[in-house]
Amino acid sequence: KRIVVLISGSGSNLQALIDAAEMGGINGHIVAVISNKPDVYGLTRAQNAKIPTEVVDHTAFDGRQAFEVELSNVINRYSPDLIVLAGFMRILNSEFVQPYEGKMLNIHPSLLPKYKGLHTHRRALENGDTEHGVSVHFVTSELDGGPVIAQRTVKVEKSDTEQSLQAKVQQQEHQLYPEVVARFCNDRLEYKDGKAYMDKKPL
Ligand code: GRF
């Protein structure tokens, strides 16, 4: 399978995917890494792994639509079977998302449907949650609202800060995302009529 990864930052999830692919754990290749921000560390990670990189800088476009048109053009040039959002921090319109429905994944640092959007660790702490975690879901036009494929939980301790909680959750992210991508690449995951299936069973 041909995988395109979209990033906006440090790319630690990208690194986990690169490592898993290099170890033969994923039945596919990362054929490109695309960032909406120039100079982020994730691009260096890709270059170190000899993966082609592209920057589609959202600030260079007149509005979201123009940005998304160019982003799709660049993505489509690589004919991906799977598009993986890995810390990609732009909201995407339905016109952009629709053609990729069922083949675009996102990782979100909360136990969805809780805490869509930003500052998830802070919100979990503020609410006194004893459990928190991470979700991987198919991307639909609803922000962080597509069907959940898999989750990992972490325990929230009284001593946890936003930073310590984030670190714990990220550790889980780095295990979970390669696992889910591997399943997708083995044709075990499907998206149909707004629902996610694994091995033909609804999730
Ligand atoms: C991760 O915590 C991810 O869940 C969130 O953004 C962060 C990206 O981190 N959507 P990285 O760029 O993969 O290091």
Image (tube, grey):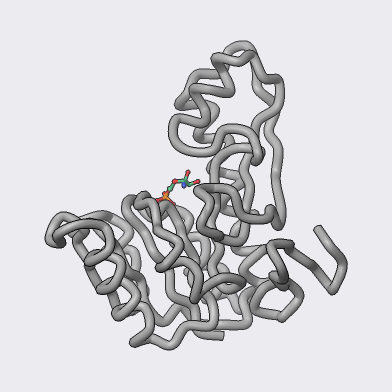
**201 w.r.t. 171: above or below:** below
**Image position, residue 83 (x, y; %):** 49, 71
Seen as rendered, the residue at the extreme right is: 201
**Residue occupying the point 62% across, 43% down:** 134
**Image position, residue 87 (x, y; %):** 42, 52
**Residue occupying the point 30% across, 79% down:** 74
**Residue occupying the point 50% across, 48% down:** 143
In which image quadrant can residue 109 be found? top right
* Left or right: 49 as drawn, with respect to 157: left
In which image quadrant can residue 33 be found? bottom left
* Left or right: 139 as drawn, with respect to 192: left
**Image position, residue 124 (x, y; %):** 58, 23
* Left or right: 17 as drawn, with respect to 183: left
* Left or right: 126 as drawn, with respect to 9: right
Of residues 179 and 50, the one nearer the viewer is 179
Total numbered labels placed on residues in the image: 0
Of residues 196 and 180, the one nearer the viewer is 196
Of residues 97 and 166, the one nearer the viewer is 97
Q: Quadrant of the N terminus?
A: bottom right
Q: Quadrant of the C terminus?
A: bottom right
**135 w.r.t. 3: above or below:** above
**Residue occupying the point 20% across, 57% down:** 63
**Image position, residue 47 (x, y; %):** 28, 72
